[in-house]
Amino acid sequence: MLELGWPLSEKAQAEIDDKKRKPSKEIRIDAMREAIEFTQRTSARGRGKVVLVFPAERMNHVTANALLKTLEEPPGELLFVLASEAAHQLLPTVRSRCQGHGMEWPQPSEATAWLQSQGLSESDASGLLLAAGGRPDDALGYFHAGHSAKAWFLLPKALLRGDDAMFKDFTAAQLVQMLHKLCHDLLALAQGAQPRFFEQNCLPLGADFARLSDWSRELGRAARTIEHPFNPGLLQQDLLSQARQRLAGAR
């Protein structure tokens, strides 16, 4: 919410401003209670209400369970919108009370044109769009973070060479995401499918499928705990070392 410039409650914002607490990475129970209390007030204009929960996968189990009864029996003209890029991470009891609606990403030509209008070159627009899996906002975020398409496509071979300097500007979360994308594409190639995030000619060949599968599971576990206060340098070294072990034999 802070990243999007959305207001918090006066109490929560005051505590963050006074540095009495840090911004939470989760949607906490107190925030959900405030939202539920809002839904129970009578609308001053006699109209319906809409509550947006975003990103919905950030609800912890306590928060999600607190929402269940209101989701099942919403008072009056109330609509809850649970927006998520990882709906599979929501509790099954939450998903069962919702109607799903998938949003489609724009066509690559449209997204590339929009990125160019934001100041990207044609090569960076198309390359970073590939790196972002077709998500133009993420591609623009990569660009603003100082990434280029050329550097992105050099990462797989740099990893094999042990050139850790190529990854020095990655946060732990960004590194796990990048490695997960690389693992995904290598698994796809091993099954005769096309890569999604990297150009095929920049990917190492000959990686063992069983090792890749184990690596994918390890990265999934790492992603679930990546926001814990680990030592960033040691974590990066461990992730890169683990990656090279899983890619042993690739060329």
Image (tube, grey):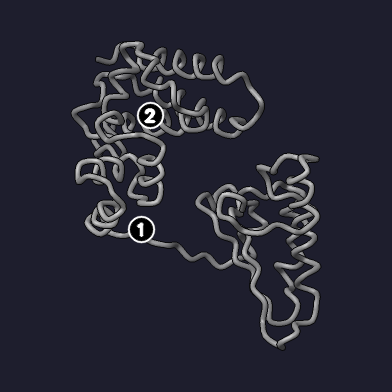
**Viewport quadrant of the C terminus:** top left
Q: Is residue 172 left or right of residue 185?
A: right
Residue where numbered disc 2 is placed: 183
Residue in view at x 54 percent, y 16 percent? 233
Residue at (24%, 31%) from the top-left corner? 150
Q: Is residue 191 left or right of residue 78?
A: left
Q: Tag 2's secondary structure?
A: helix
> In the current view of this chain or complex, which residue is farthest to the front?
18
**Tag 1 secondary structure:** loop
Q: Is residue 181 left or right of residue 98?
A: left
Position in image of residue 236 (x %, y %): 50, 19
Say which amino acid is labelled 1.
Trp
Crowding at mark 2 (Cα within 10 Å: few <14, some 14-19, many 20+): many
Q: Name which of mark 1 and mark 2 comes first in the sequence.
A: 1
Q: Nearer the viewer, mark 1 or mark 2?
A: 1
In the rendered image, the vertical position of residue 4 relative to residue 250, given as above or below = below
What is the CA distance from the residue labelled 1 to the residue labelled 2? Answer: 23 Å
The percent position of residue 51, horizontal first and vertical second, equals 66, 68
Kindly identify the residue that appears in the image at 48 percent across and 29 percent down. Answer: 176
Query: What residue is disc 1 on?
Result: 105
The three-letter code of the residue at mark 2 reads Cys
Total numbered labels? 2
Q: Between 243 and 27, which is closer to the camera in this rendering?
A: 27
* Residue drawn 46% across the image and 16% down it: 242
Q: In the rendered image of this protein, does residue 46 appear above or below residue 209?
A: below
Identify the image quadrant of residue 231.
top right
Task: Rate crowding at label 1 as few (under 14), some (14 to 19) or many (20 or more) other CA atoms within 10 Å.
Answer: few
Instruction: Please state which of residues 132 and 99 is positioned toward the viewer in this rendering.
Output: 132
Residue 36: percent from left, percent from top: 77, 66
